[in-house]
Image (spheres, grey):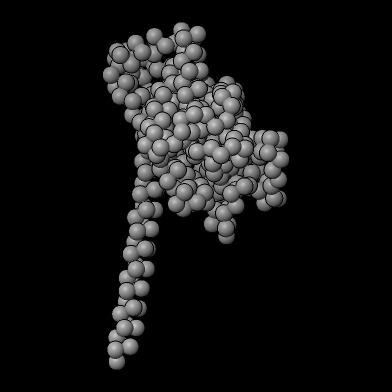
Amino acid sequence: MVMAETTTSSSSSSSLDDSNVTRNKLWKVAFAVSGIMLTLVTYGVLQEKIMRVPYGVNKDYFKYSLFLVFCNRITTSAVSAAALVARDKALLPVAPIYKYCLVSVSNILTTTCQYEALKYVSFPVQTLAKCAKMIPVMIWSALIMQKKYQGTDYLLAFSVTLGCSIFILYPAGTDISPYGRGRENTIWGILLMIGYLGFDGFTSTFQDKLFKGYDMEIHNQIFYTSLCSCMLSLTGLIVQGHLIPAIEFIYHHNDCFFDVLLLSTVATASQFFISYTIRNFGALTFATIMTTRQLVSIILSCVWFAHPLSSEQWIGAVVVFGTIYAKSFLRKTPQRTTSLEETVQNGNSNNLRENP
């Protein structure tokens, strides 16, 4: 009798423990999803607002994209330095400084192309085009890391690229850029997006090479690449003569100042949520969340900024997101070295950012 009661008690305790574990995991998933969605969707809305919506009674446009890069990087470097100090990690560089600088240069070019492209293509076009980054990442990975991919990976890349091409080449005729004449898909805008994809692919691949070649803490790389980016972007602003005009612009337009401040804050905060998600749930879960985030961002941008979508663009979007979701749900086990879900969103699991 006592034995039976003991067994029943142990079974109830075990069920209760399992229930608590499941509940805790659900709370962690909800925390990760809400954090990524809130920060990166807000980031997407803000970058489109800053670069495409006029400020003040005179309808002035903010044209200094490199200043946004500078603000984002100086915030990120400060937070990453604080994280290293708080965790008693060394602030000394692990790799040669020039390697951090190489990542910084390509990252600055990536982000600048991203912001500048918004002058000529809408945010939905830009966001969907980012899904095609798997192509340059695969090319750079083959050249730098000697990686090999399976046939299904190339099929996935082709399907996503096809969907992106349809989305870009068949825009709604009424969606016009505030910076130029004609339809959204101007040659200059497309060239900027190609530049973005190429530079971003190199950045992701070279970051992966640094992680594999050195015993490097994630915050160490973020700190030094962000610090180098701060100095390089500041130099660029001074050489171009854009530093003072950018400061004067946000001084005379308080709403722009708060937009830039919030943009830098959510860009930095997103790093925590991305890192938290990958470390707790893996790159596959992260890729699925990021794909959903891109879909939500496109829908929100279309509603908020009144971007019309043609029927061909809807088809292109279905092809892109359908392919990515199908690949995500068909995978049985995540493969960290050549994961195309990681390639689609961030280039590599070690590259813990959405390039804000």
Instruction: Give the quarter of the image for residue 86.
Output: top left
Q: Is residue 105 above or below residue 344?
A: above
The residue shown at (37%, 44%) is: 35
Residue 74 picture location, percent across and down: 41, 24
- Along the line of sight, the residue nearer the viewer: 278 or 251: 278
For residue 20, side relative to residue 89 (left or right): left
Q: Is residue 52 above or below residue 266?
A: above
The residue shown at (54%, 57%) is: 329
Residue 103 picture location, percent across and down: 57, 28
* Number of numbered labels in the structure image: 0
Q: Quadrant of the C terminus?
A: top left
Instruction: Give the quarter of the image for residue 49.
Output: top left
Q: Quadrant of the N terminus?
A: bottom left
- Along the line of sight, the residue nearer the viewer: 319 or 253: 253
Residue 130 visible in the shown view: yes
The residue shown at (68%, 39%) is: 145
- Along the line of sight, the residue nearer the viewer: 298 or 98: 98
- Along the line of sight, the residue nearer the viewer: 127 or 2: 2
Residue 17 picture location, percent across and down: 34, 68
For residue 347, side relative to residue 42 (left or right): right
Instruction: Give the quarter of the image for residue 275.
Output: top left
Residue 166 visible in the shown view: no
Residue 48 picture location, percent across and down: 41, 28
